[in-house]
Amino acid sequence: TISSNHWAMAWVGLEINTLAVLPLISKSHHPRAIEASTKYFLTQAAASTLLLFSSMTNAWYSGQWDISQLTHPVSCMLLTVAISIKLGLVPFHFWFPEVLQGSTLMTCLLLATVMKFPPITLFYLTSSSLNPALLSSMAIASAALGGWMGLNQTQTRKILAFSSIAHLGWMAIILIYNPNLTLIAFFLYTMTTSAIFFILNTTNTLKLSTMMAAWTKIPSLSTTFMLTLLSLAGLPPLTGFLPKWLIIQELTKQELTMAATTIALLSLLGLFFYLRLAYCATITLPPNFTNFMKQWQSNKSTDTLTTTLT
């Protein structure tokens, strides 16, 4: 999909991606995992159908199958909707938190990072043809709902799912004006989120209640985890602040001060639940000296990889 210039090959690549990840979601054979894989398949199949219909409509009117030659207004709108469904942008976000909740942490990592790269690449290649008003509306709605819905969650996978939706809002709002900033924001988000998922997988943390004691298992990762969360929240001078600052700066240059102010204020919602995660992970419980030597044992390779990603 990433290297293709033809709509048919891009569609085939997206379908291969979908079929490749389905066994990973359902491999535990738990009813929740089967439900998650079914939801994922249905939504991705619907989005792929819309994308194919969009490309066929454009080819019918323009005679072009090249990705960069998207000119028909109906095709542009259908493409925006199709890729928004694949990414999980509001109002097509309904499937994403449920699928992540039914998957393992490592599968969640793939769904939240790697599997979003091909659709974002299609957005990048067609950015000049997209509808600015539609995309900006979905972006602000994603930042708002991602932050708001994350406040009530106690499951770490759902919290990171809504975090992903909120970050997609930041990427989408700047896509038309400066597509390179979208890629920068996505790559930095991928690195930071990967570090968080590796830490959660190492400590086997699925809920906030278990996170409160997780730091005693691997104390060396507690500081790393807190800094990574604050970076994901976009606090200066950490890495996650850079793309948000550049996006706000670019929106201001484009005379979209209201949009920049709105999305900056909405990021405070996300900051709240990131701080709650950091609080639960590092401050909540006093040290527990039961089996203390065993709790300090950890996987050194995972620790090194997580620190590098941070």
Image (cartoon, helix red, strand yellow):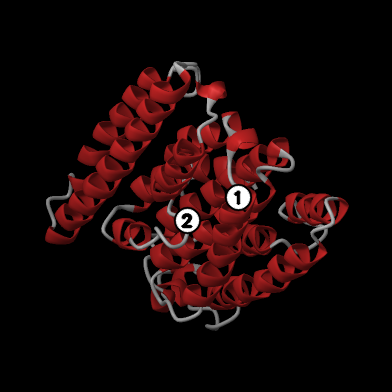
Residue 99, horizontal then vertical, whole percent: 30, 56
Tell which of 99 and 222 is nearer to you: 99
Q: Is residue 153 visible?
A: yes
Q: Is residue 289 visible?
A: no
Task: Return the residue nearer the eye: 78 or 205.
Answer: 78
Residue in view at x 33 percent, y 31 percent: 52
Q: Which mark is residue 89?
A: 2
Toward the front, the furthest residue is: 61
Q: Residues within 10 Å of mark 1 (few under 14, many from 20)?
A: many
Question: Which residue is label 1 attached to?
Answer: 172
Residue 37 percent coordinates (x, y): 21, 49
> Image check: 19 left or right of 247?
left
Q: Is residue 29 left or right of residue 188?
A: left
Q: Position of residue 109 (x, y in %)?
A: 43, 47
Label 2 crowd (10 A; few <14 / some 14-19 / many >=20) = many
Q: Mark 2 near mark 1, Cβ–Cβ under 8 Å?
A: yes
Q: How many marks?
A: 2
Q: Amino acid at mark 1?
A: Ala
Quarter occupied by residue 267:
bottom right
Give the amino acid type for the residue marked by disc 2 in the picture. Leu
SS of the residue at dot 1? helix
SS assignment at label 2? loop
179 with respect to 218 (left or right) = right
Give me the residue at 23% from left, 45% from top: 41
Q: Position of residue 111 (x, y in %)?
A: 39, 45
Q: Which residue occupies the foreground of this view, 104 or 280?
A: 104
Distance Cα–Cα, label 2 vs label 1: 9 Å
Asked if residue 285 is positioned above or below residue 42 in the image, the reply reads below
Disc with the residue nearer the chain's start (2 vs 1):
2
Compared to residue 207, the image places residue 6 above or below, namely: above
Q: Residue at x 37, y 66 (%)?
A: 206
Residue drawn at (62%, 77%) of the image: 272
